[in-house]
Image: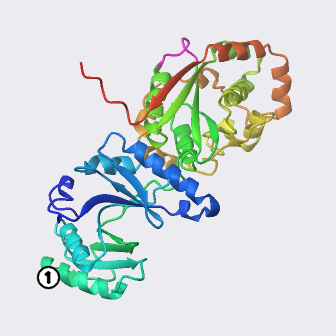
Amino acid sequence: MLAETEKDIFSGLPAFARPCVVVHYHEVGLKGKNRSGFENQLRRNILRALSDTTVGSVQRFFGRLVVFFPKEIDWPAVRARLKTVFGVANFSPAIFTEQNEEEITAAALSLMKERKYDSFRVTTKRGQKEFPINSQEMNIRVGSAVQKMSGARVDLTNPEVTCYIEIFNKNALVYAEKIPGAGGLPSGVSEKAVVLLSSGIDSPVAAWKMMKRGVRVVFAHFHSVPATSEASIRKTERIVQELTRYQFKSRLYLVPVLEIQNEIRVEAPEELRLLLFRRIMMKLAEKLAGYEKATALITGESVGQVASQTLSNIHAISAGIELPVLRPLVGDDKIEIIEVAQKISTFDISIEPHEDCCTLFVPEHPETRARAQKLREIEAHLNLEPLISEAIKKTVVKKFQHPLPAPVKK
């Protein structure tokens, strides 16, 4: 653990040392001929995530990225930002130094003295085989120096702190902790998709899971204002701002659907109204996907969670939609979904009370095994196409970005 405060993490470094952050990635490194493209996107995303800090440059060294800073590092801010960058397996505050034993040892001592521990180990990875000291001998030499300084015992099996040394090219990296990153693929390496976003718990988690696969997500929220309050809109905007931390820029389409709902409520059987309305939301989302050149839709559906999410109903709702409909939560239970929502800071927003557009259609005895043909027949007798076109015309688009721009000083 760190001594005192995280702001002191690089205090007392030797003059030759360059404080930095080393970023390791796993899945990106398996991409073969496409690897450089993924690495470059990850590099750009790191620079974007740290744009409101003192970041200088991000450079690639033999399967790792090193983030350099031209002046003092605001480590708490850097740590918080890097934890939201998809594609990062883990990252570490580190010292970048020249490749010789004295400087490496001095760097290790300067890092280890800022920590409190009773046991430790040194682990050296020697990518540069021309370095005259092999990994085992380097572990012993640096470990002896750390032990003499700290009085801690060496534990090769279960140490409280591990001092890592990576030797490559003409340089070396030294660090003493690995902080888990967000994992997945860098935002922007996959194609674009439209997520049907309610202000509830599930769909924000579904969006986050697809963002973790590198998908650029566009948000579509359907509302029934003024029949309902604007609470769901305000909640959805806050959810999108939270999720934008993971992809830096977002667009939210706010689609008014009250007129469509009124038509369905008058003409459709009660037990099928909600399913028919969800079917129309799919059609609206598909139209928005066309404008965005998106290649898929995303929903927060989980099999059996509510009556509208039986296998039969899921099929009936999406039958006729040409784009693939991705359901990343389809096999998750509510506890699993809530755990992720809490992790990504959308849960507390989602559980705030509100009326959403679907509350107007909740039947006393919902249909659990609807047939797609039956929904198509009812839809054919309704005058929905003009209402769908009108809803698209009245749609409001809002833009979000992260990090937020600094306020203008007056």
Q: Is residue 31 left or right of residue 162?
A: right
Viewer-nearest residue: 371 or 212: 212
Q: Position of residue 50 (x, y in %)?
A: 36, 44
Q: Which residues are the magenta region?
A: 224-230
Indicate whether 160 appears above or below 72.
below
Asked where in the image residue 268 lies, by quadrant, the reply is top right
Q: Name the residue rendered at 65%, 26% in the picture.
A: 364
Given the image, on which type of amino acid does mark 1 rest? Lys
- Vertical order, 285 against 228 (above or below): below
What kind of element bears circle 1? helix
Q: Position of residue 216 (x, y in %)?
A: 58, 40
In-front residue for pair 246/367: 246
Q: Which residue is mark 1?
A: 148
Using the image as rendered, state which of residue 303 and residue 177 is in the foreground: 177
Q: Please state which of residues 6 and 62 is positioned toward the viewer in this rendering.
A: 62
**Within the magenta stretch, is there residue 226?**
yes
How many numbered discs sit on the rendered protein?
1
The answer to whether one can see residue 62 in this image is: yes
Q: Name the residue: 77% across, 39% down.
A: 315
